[in-house]
Amino acid sequence: MRYILIMLIVLLGVAVLYFKDRMLLSPHDAYYSALLRENLKVTAERWKMEANESLATPLQISLPYSERRLLEANHLQPIAFAFNLKMDELIQVHIIPSQNTRAEIFVDVFYAEDTITEPIRIGSMDAKEQQLKIAVEHTGKYMVRIQPSHSAQGLIDAIITSPLRYGFPVDTDRENAVQSLFGVGRDGGTRRHEGIDIFAPRGTPVVAAETGQVTRVGDTPRGGKNVWVRGDQRSFYYAHLDSIAVSPGDRVVRGEVLGTVGNTGNAVTTSPHLHFGIYKFAQGAVDPLPMVGRKKVIDTYTPPLTELAPRWLSIKTESANLRSGPSSKASSVASLVRTELVQVDSVAGDWLRVTTGNGTNGFIARHLTGAPSESVLTLTENHIAFSLPNNTAPVISNFSVGDKLQALGRFGSFVWVKMPGGFFAWATAAKQENLVKIHGHKNQ
């Protein structure tokens, strides 16, 4: 019997090691391990390094956010987006690939407790899935990292939203329905308001904010006619009702009528309203406002129609601000000059998410860019032409002193040039040489 037990323990240990990718690792980590097993160590380490670097330099966005991105060789870098949320709000990520896309897309969500501590991964999406939804447990900064597989090809739409967690509990279209907030003083400051008050005409339907079971129906001096519903690890409290339409034990779905707005209980001297509270198990009352909003809404987000932009565009104004987010109100992170090239990584509505020649990431208004115009660059020294604006890229040609090149703009220490035969290359060129020797630029 003892030996049988030992054999079972050994077999269990082997099974754990064999299936550790699925049992212990996130999809992102499992993919990294798979690359190592396929003897693609260099690819795996670069993939992992780029993933970590993206978390160190996230782009700050406001939700909802969406972008369209073309996946192709040499343009598969991960991107991390940062935003702030309150406790119990939702993060929802939706990845929509085009019909002919061949790619695995790895999505991870992180909580950044502070600027010193390493971000904590709080959720991941399997590469075969298209949607991830997470309820956050802390108020603070969160990041979503989106990284395609190392050989991805195609087109994807990435959508990040924070939908309301629950439905609005009163069937009213009033814009200013919520008039008393969570935490304000009551009874001369002896207690705090443990909910929100939603005002509406007497008899307006009160509906279930979330699916659950009616646990209690009552009529108390403070809450008047009231209903308690348990669901989603919380209890929902509906008070001051004029009438009740459910009974204890009833199963209700989101949007189902529970009763009508009134002013029973200690609200007899006020206008009819619903007192709505949410109580989290083992914690007590929490603020309902971030979870239901200030008014009844159809909580859907339709991404703006966007067209892909060319991979390389030129600044067409004397100067242009590169911003931290896709908005003219976002802070400026760099100033770009006329003819400077940017690499377009994705399209976000009327904004482009780009990388500059010095590696800075940000957003620029699309109307500030245009197709590069040709100029003439006369070389003052010998140069090497690379396939990409990178000194480690394959060398495809050499240039000599006195060569005249058709140049389309500068990207860092490189100039994009048109070669005989119509193909393009990247030539290293000193900044001074580029500024002095390029002539014939056509204003756009």
Image (tube, rainbow, N blue to C red):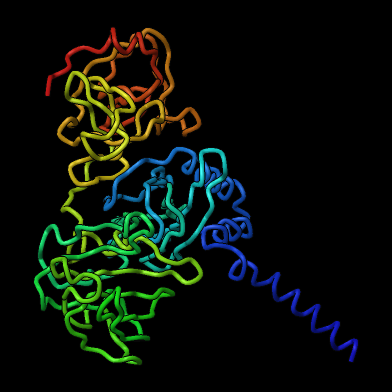
Compared across the picture, whether 225 is left or right of 411 comes to: left
Query: Which residue occupies the foreground of this view, 300 or 227?
Result: 227
Above or below 102: residue 409: above
Q: Is residue 404 left or right of residue 40?
A: left
Q: Point out residue 5 in the picture as x, y percentages from the top left corner.
A: 84, 86
Q: Where residue 119 appears, x then y in whole percent?
A: 53, 48
Q: Residue, x 38% and y 53% (percent of image)? A: 86
Residue 93 visible here: no
> Of residues 309 and 228, which is closer to you in this image?
228
Please name whichever residue, 363 or 179, is drawn nearer the observer in this view of the structure.
179
Q: How many labels sit on residues?
A: 0
Please state the horizontal and vertical placement of residue 379, each as a whole percent of the image.
Answer: 34, 11
Q: Quadrant of the N terminus?
A: bottom right
Q: Is residue 76 visible?
A: yes
* Frontmost residue, 246 versus 404: 246
Determine whether 138 is above or below 432 in the image: below
The residue most toward the front is 188
Q: Quadrant of the C terminus?
A: top left
**Residue shown at 25%/81% (left/top)?**
225
User: What x and y, as percent, mark residue 240?
Assistant: 23, 75
Q: Is residue 353 above or below residue 48?
A: above
The residue lying furthest to the right in this view is: 2
